[in-house]
Image (cartoon, rainbow, N blue to C red):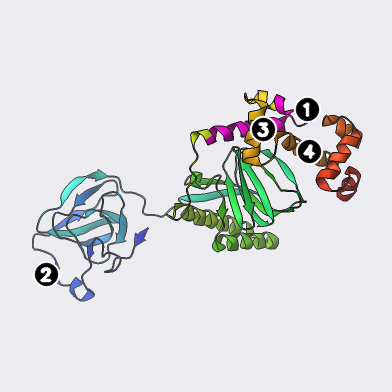
Amino acid sequence: MIRNLNQVTFRCFGSVPSERTQTDRNLFREDAVALRLSNTETTVYRAASETRVSCNMGMSVLSVSTDGESYQRFYLDKPAVIKKGITFSLEPFQGDATVMLSASQSPEELGKRAPGSLRVDHRLRVEGIYTFFYQEKEQGFVFSGESHPMTELTYVDQGALHSVVDGQDLVLKQGDLVLYGPGQWHMQYADIGIAPRFVTISFDISGVELSPLLNRKFTAPQSVVTLLQSMLQEQERMDAFSNDMILYQLNLLLLRLQREAASPKAGKLQTSNAVHSENEIIRQAQQYISAHIREKLSVPLVARQVDVSPSYLTALFHKNLQISPGEYIRRIKLQESKQMIRENNLNFTEIAAELQYSTVHHFSRQFKEKFGITPTEYAKSVR
């Protein structure tokens, strides 16, 4: 971004003479030279002494740096005095341009470079949103898991939610959020007696990597909560401009999270190789269970699939998910049964058989224990 050249904005790099002296011809030495600026190549200098520059013809831009790497750009609409040791370059803004340069010692030429774009572009851009849901779930719900090529954000508005990704169980309470990266398998569930309400958004982004934000629990700053509330209001309003407003607000939300993550006060997730290995075992086990949920499953069978002993798999599930793998299988089967009931293609006996229950009575008893209602009562509520 091109900045306004004045005494305050330029103070780290030199000075800007007062308006009264800027027209004084004594500002430049008699040996001042005129430089014609190129649109294709610019010279990088280091000031060997105080160096005075001023636009002579056309419009030009002065780029300055204290370290030779990070530059700030100024519109050269008035003379400037560059301090000794500052790295700088000059380029035309539009069309042809020349500048006057004066110094007791000629600036050191450091090399050539192609002029960069003078326009500010997005570092992070939300390219599009696929889904934007406000979810109201029943007590103890279980989402058995999925992966997809989009990035996904989950924000808990009420209650609490377990967010499991790569074998790590993050307990999200009201006001917390988490981001899943493209292709990351994840699942969610609520504890018995908890009926969470939460927002999920899936989207594509370009530019800055979101890796510092992934698989971390954030307590959303109030500015982020306000943006989410505004996005939900736009979704209700849904006029010709609402989708653009939602895209813009999500972009701003992610930028605020990036800044939060980069803050020195932000906690860093440091995971050892051993924990990474444990998480990978759990992730593979969860994926296998999800993919084979309508088959006869057991803890020894799942353990063989991930090449560990049943006792070790059980210890990992208790340590990371606070439930046994057997209970996990039961929850996913029962959640699958709810989906089958909603589809209304099979009767209860057929559903029980499809999910490998020994009898329909066994299925019905576990269903009521888990959800507090019978399969028949649930079927009536969703049809």
Q: Would you name the residue on which mark 2 appears?
A: 26
In the image shown, does 263 or 89 lie closer to the viewer?
Answer: 263
Range covered by the magenta-colored residues:
275-301
Q: In which quarter of the image is residue 59?
A: bottom left
Main secondary structure found in the magenta portion? helix
Report if the CB atoms under discs 1 and 4 are less than 8 Å apart: no
Q: Nearer the viewer, mark 3 or mark 2?
A: 3
Residue 314, numbered label:
3
Residue 380 percent coordinates (x, y): 90, 48
Which is more N-terminal, label 2 or label 1? 2
The quadrant of the rendering that contains the N terminus is bottom left
Real-space CA distance between mark 4 and mark 2, rounded to the nearest whole angstrom: 85 Å
When the figure is inspected, residue 23 is found, relative to residue 233, above or below; the finding is: below
Which residue lies at the image location 91% right of the left edge and 44% below the top edge?
A: 376
**What crowding class fits label 1: few (fewer than 14 Cα within 10 Å), some (14-19), or many (20 or more)?**
some
Residue 336, numbered label:
4
Amino acid, disc 4: Glu
Which residue lies at the image location 66% right of the left edge and 53% below the top edge?
A: 199
| In the displayed structure image, the side of residue 212 where residue 53 appears, left or right | left
Which is more N-terminal, label 4 or label 3? 3
Amino acid, disc 3: Thr
Report if the CB atoms under discs 3 and 1 are less than 8 Å apart: no
Q: Under tag 1, what secondary structure?
A: loop
Q: Would you name the residue on which mark 1 appears?
A: 295
Q: Which of marks 4 and 2 is in front?
A: 4
In the image shown, does 144 or 231 lie closer to the viewer?
Answer: 144
Amino acid, disc 1: Glu
Real-space CA distance between mark 3 and mark 2, rounded to the nearest whole angstrom: 84 Å
Q: Which of marks 3 and 1 is in front?
A: 3
Which is more N-terminal, label 1 or label 3? 1
